[in-house]
Amino acid sequence: MKILVTGGTGYIGSHTVVELLKAGYEVIAIDNFDNSYPTVLDSLKKITGVDIPFAEVDIRDKKALKAFIKATPGIDAVIHFAANKAVGESVANPLKYYENNVGGTVNLLEALQENNINQIVFSSSCTVYGEANPPVDENAPIPVANSPYGNTKQICEEVLRDQTQASNLQVVALRYFNPVGAHESALIGELPIGIPNNLVPFITQTAIGKREFLTVFGDDYPTPDGTCIRDYIHVVDIAIAHVAAIKFLEDKKQASAFSVFNLGTGKGNSVLEAIQSFEKVSGKKLNYKIGPRRAGDVVQVYASCEKAWNELGWKTERDLETCMKSAWDWELALAK
Ligand SMILES: NC(=O)c1ccc[n+]([C@@H]2O[C@H](COP(=O)([O-])OP(=O)(O)OC[C@H]3O[C@@H](n4cnc5c(N)ncnc54)[C@H](O)[C@@H]3O)[C@@H](O)[C@H]2O)c1
């Protein structure tokens, strides 16, 4: 099968390209380098030995996107990563998020419909659950989103679900919990532009001296050590789940045209546990301070993953220390 990967040079997209090739799929990637670099393609070649077919396409540009898909015969399925993902930025600039994440997805769906491409795997997020009681399963209610970014994920899921009713489209929406870590080669990983929004890049950047200290936002939450709890999942495990999702569509295992799965480990770790794990694997003492709570942070969230275990036949294999070690190796490689 030939798989089109949008956002293919991004963090999760690049790791997924590696796993797709490993599993024997043909891949073609597009990206507009809004949040990634062309050098990722060189790294992918080093890892896989393959010159990844690639085109610089902006999914907001409907005409260019349609022309590209029309001119690329044989696409069987799409994995759709391309989006903006910074919650804070989405609050400051919601239209950017609605245009890119929602508008871009609509453009893509139009292009797929016109070319009779009927299978898509979509990057959703646990953010759709807001403040839910963990472990959170896929039937948990979807409350009003607490950011425009979260809202774009909810809306895209609805757009995709509606499109399955009106066409032959088959959708797998994957709700990621907290993707962290990097490829074991340390050739690809998360490359946040500017100040990282997420904990793990902030930890590694502080440890290497790019940031003076890390602020832990609140230690007075109703959790065992008072800090927030998240479900940290290794990016390679996430990437492998996409291969499982493609296989699931290929084998026609879906009970309905719109399927949704949580991707997590099923285990929550606190911010302090994540820091301790990093200190253990890196041998570095992290300079961190306890600060006030940050507005909008959910107290604790971790996944119930039974649906993905049972229906996708997928399970995480990498633990928190592996996540931290690979993230640190990646930061060290970047420093070189
Ligand atoms: N990383 C996370 O914590 C996380 C969690 C849940 C969901 N997600 C979702 O997973 C997907 C991938 O996230 P990521 O962490 O790899 O982010 P990323 O920013 O590293 O990757 C996204 C890629 O899409 C590209 N892109 C953005 N807009 C585009 C456009 N208009 N046209 C073409 N390319 C475009 C970017 O340049 C980037 O390379 C996103 O949809 C994100 O919302 C990420």
Image: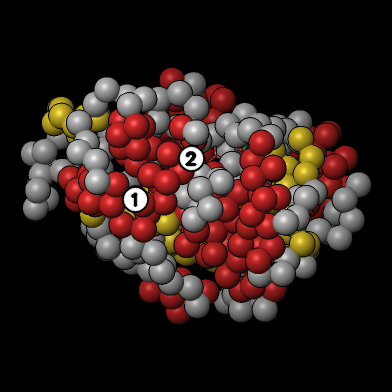
Instruction: Identify residue type, mark 1.
Output: Met
Residue at 41% from the left image edge and 51% from the top image edge: 326
Q: In this orientation, which residue lies closer to the viewer: 300 or 185? A: 185
Q: Where residue 257 sits in the image (x, y, percent)? A: 62, 67
Which of 199 and 300 lies nearest the eye of the viewer? Answer: 199
Q: Dividing the image into 4 quarters, which one contains the N terminus?
A: bottom right
Q: What amino acid is found at the position of numbered circle 2 in the picture?
A: Ala
Q: Nearer the viewer, mark 2 or mark 1?
A: 2
Q: Which residue extends farthest front?
A: 336
Q: Residue 94: give x, y in percent of width and height.
A: 49, 25
- In the picture of the structure, the residue carrying the numbered disc 1 is 324
Q: What residue is at 46 percent from the left and 32 percent from the top? A: 335
Horizontal side of residue 221 vs 297, given as left or right: left
Residue 221 circle label: none
Q: From the viewer's perspective, is 19 left or right of 168?
A: left
Residue at x 60% of width, y 56% of height: 16
> Could one spot residue 237 in this view of the protein?
yes
Q: Residue at x 58, y 38 (%)?
A: 83
Within 10 Å of disc 2 (Cα), the crowding (few <14, some 14-19, many 20+) is few
Q: Is residue 179 visible?
A: no
Q: CA distance from mark 2 to mark 1?
A: 14 Å
In this figure, which residue is indicated by the disc labeled 2?
333
- Choose top left, top right, bottom left or bottom right for residue 42: top right
Q: Nearer the viewer, residue 184 or 136?
A: 184
Residue 11, quarter of the rendered image? top right
**Above or below for 226 versus 310:** above
Dot 2 beta carbon under 8 Å from ligand 1? no
Q: Earlier in the sequence, mark 2 or mark 1?
A: 1
Q: Quadrant of ligand 1?
A: top right
Mark 1 is surrounded, within 10 Å at the Cα level, by few (under 14), some (14 to 19) or many (20 or more) other residues, namely many
